[in-house]
Image (cartoon, coloured by chain):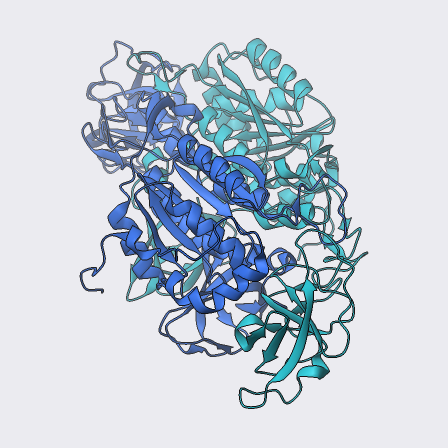
Chain colours: A cyan, B blue
Amino acid sequence: MFGPPTLTKGSSQVIVPPTLDSSRGSPIAAARHRRFAMPEFFTVRTPPEAWRLFSQHFTPRVRMARIPTVDALDRVLAEALTSPQDLPEFPRSTVDGYAVNAADTYGASPSLPAFLDVIGEMPMGRAADLHVGVGQAVLVHTGGMIPAGASGVVMVENTQQVDAAGIEVLRPVAEGENVIQVGEDIRQGDPILAPGHTLRPQDIGGLVALGITSVAVAEAPRVGIVSTGDEVVPPGRPVLPGQVRDINSYTLAALTRRAGGAPTLYGIVPDQRPALVATLTQAHAENDLVVLSAGSSVSYRDLSVEVIAELGRPGVLAHGLSVRPGKPTIIAVCDGVPVFGLPGNPVSAMVIFDLVVAPAIRSLLGAPRVYAPQVSARLARNLASAPGREDYIQVRLETRDGETWAVPVLGKSNLIYTLVHADGVVQIPLDAGGLREGVWVTVTLH
Amino acid sequence: MFGPPTLTKGSSQVIVPPTLDSSRGSPIAAARHRRFAMPEFFTVRTPPEAWRLFSQHFTPRVRMARIPTVDALDRVLAEALTSPQDLPEFPRSTVDGYAVNAADTYGASPSLPAFLDVIGEMPMGRAADLHVGVGQAVLVHTGGMIPAGASGVVMVENTQQVDAAGIEVLRPVAEGENVIQVGEDIRQGDPILAPGHTLRPQDIGGLVALGITSVAVAEAPRVGIVSTGDEVVPPGRPVLPGQVRDINSYTLAALTRRAGGAPTLYGIVPDQRPALVATLTQAHAENDLVVLSAGSSVSYRDLSVEVIAELGRPGVLAHGLSVRPGKPTIIAVCDGVPVFGLPGNPVSAMVIFDLVVAPAIRSLLGAPRVYAPQVSARLARNLASAPGREDYIQVRLETRDGETWAVPVLGKSNLIYTLVHADGVVQIPLDAGGLREGVWVTVTLH
């Protein structure tokens, strides 16, 4: 879809003009400066370009942990599993009835039943020294072992007791009927599950059925989350005029958990270079991936990109994504650790998390990129978009005449309650000029 | 859909014939007896009938816990929340630019710009004693407070610096443009979220944005899980001929977690009345709901139904469901605690868990019954069914020509690897005679 990358050294993308006062004494001065310097700062990329560049510079390494299978629900498998044995290991009955030679029952009917001698009962949970000969039957229970010599099981409902030692069979039974054969569930050596598979309840059941009591799973990638902004305060404190409570730390931590990562919050960093350098350096050293939620103001973004660029090589790969909302995004790899600078507004932050951070977390798990459920729905109104830009539209789902419709949530795009009122998100692809009312779209559920 | 129930005393449904040897000395004797007594034991019900009867006898009580909002991801809300304040509490800019009187910019263009005096800058995170008069402008940052007197914000890109104290505005700005008004995100008193809602990342963000730092959530219902069967052994031990490893304890525990419950395993109980009475009595006393996974053999089922019937009033409400797989199901309410006897085979156990146990757990959470994602798909082959019976077919999903198809997983229905190979399940409704290839069906994902 795209040609070979023309640019491989991401760090060369960030040109910090020597005239910029990097201590940011006066935002006015910085803003004035920006009007002239901005084009040099932005290397806006399409999401596929950015992801390709990111993939060239980031080699995810999955850290494995061996844990008990019974604790592995929702964990991502990190090994290929094959069956160590046949399952079942002995032929089992699927019904309550009598194990017989099938041939003894051929032609049996209520008017012309087959008479068989009952020579015993198979106990549950152990073998028994019973052999079903011609004209003989052995009582078996659902799930129990089939005795040697038997080739089928006649259901108890299709028999009639004659005396203490004999039954009449009222219906013929075929060879193998009502029997699970050795290895019929799974055979020794058969592949079971592949790396990257997220373990479900039945997978855990299937593994313990084979005596596989521990599994190698991917450890949750450590994700450091840093907020910045002089106006941002922790949610538990009183808010003064001009201040807003920190939303993104907690939303991003929850999104990280959903993606399979282990978040660590580094708090709210004052909007000053030394503080940001110190916190980002620490987060970079302690995590597999770092997410910075900066203010959306251009002066915040400049400080972020400068500090991220200095964390390691190759540094900033994209500064700006052709996505709405979410254009002011920074994508970097610094000495092997992905660092993402997300826009400050919560809607943009969530869109960009889903678009670039979650796939990076998934790659550190060795897991497929898409993990949120998706549904098809019809779009409830026309949506405009500019070609060359991906748009992400928050929608709620409605059922109309048995069909699911995706109704765009109105309102300014940067309001947190837009997300609270939405059930999912619809992508308008890069080269679509928009989407028409009534078309079927894929909704990725929140 | 159904008339008034004709039967309100569920306990009268279980008639234990006095001739039954309840100590079960000989399974042969029990099995022989069964052929005559069986009709009295079974009160087979359709799932809707069983659920209606169950609902009449079970009054779920949601236990609440107050926890920090930031720890409430995926928990079920147990209170109605309304907004304690307007959000935002002050008008905020959505761009970097200049707060102005919109009227001052009317008619402005690059060839005829409006000249404004810049009287200062709004700092981030605090109020400032600035008032924008006629012909004046104040520098504002994205997310920052709009000063008094201003009615719109002109983007910095649409201005030009003239000198240290003046700018030219190159484009008019409308009243309210680039401003989020007080309460535009959410207003004081507006409903936010209703009880029963499962908290998502953005909900946590929306709550902390309002300073709601703790929430009442439903405590996870305690679910006791009991396995029985003389042939069933723990998965970590060597298996002798005739023995099988315990699958259901772990599959049911994982399914319980997925539904929002907190499972406790009571181990594998020998198939003897005193042991089963002791364990079920303890599990009944210690949990909000009890699940018994018994063998599918009729003798196991009889013992189960007898012991469950004695746990409390009204006792057994359904013994047998018109469902395939899963007919040998026991539904009981014993002194206010639901007790479910599930078939021993893992496929039936999972189908019945989803059908009756999960909805009971959800009711104890005050949450909607359906929680697993569902997708639409076209059925890849004809499926037969008997009217008057619900069928549940395990399917895997395939994409063909951009459409999703549900391909039934072949094989005997009671094999655990049927579930491992399946992506979800399709219901054939009670009164459908089957489903035709190509029809659209709803697949509930595993």
Q: Which residue is more in the foreground, B340 or A212?
A: B340
The answer to whether B27 appears left or right of B305 in the picture is right
B117 or A31: which is nearer to us?
A31
The picture places residue B343, in percent across and down from the top left corner, at: 51, 55
Residue A47 at what x, y percent from top left? 58, 45
Q: In this view of the protein, which residue sits in the foreground, B62 or A35?
A: B62
Judged left or right of residue A134, residue A28 is left
Residue A291 percent location from the top left of the image: 57, 27
Measuring 23% from the left and 58% from the top, which residue is drawn there?
Answer: B7
Is B188 positioned to the left or the right of A156 in the image?
left
Residue at 45% in and 16% down: A27
In this view, B442 is above or below B61: below
Q: State the count of labels.
A: 0
A240 and B45: which is toward the camera? B45
Q: State which quadrant residue A167 falls in.
A: bottom right
Outermost residue to the front: A164
The x, y position of residue A418, in whole percent, is 33, 39
| Quarter of the N terminus of chain B within the rendering | bottom left
**Residue A295 visible here:** no
In this view of the protein, can residue B63 be seen by the observer? yes
Q: Quadrant of residue A398?
A: bottom left
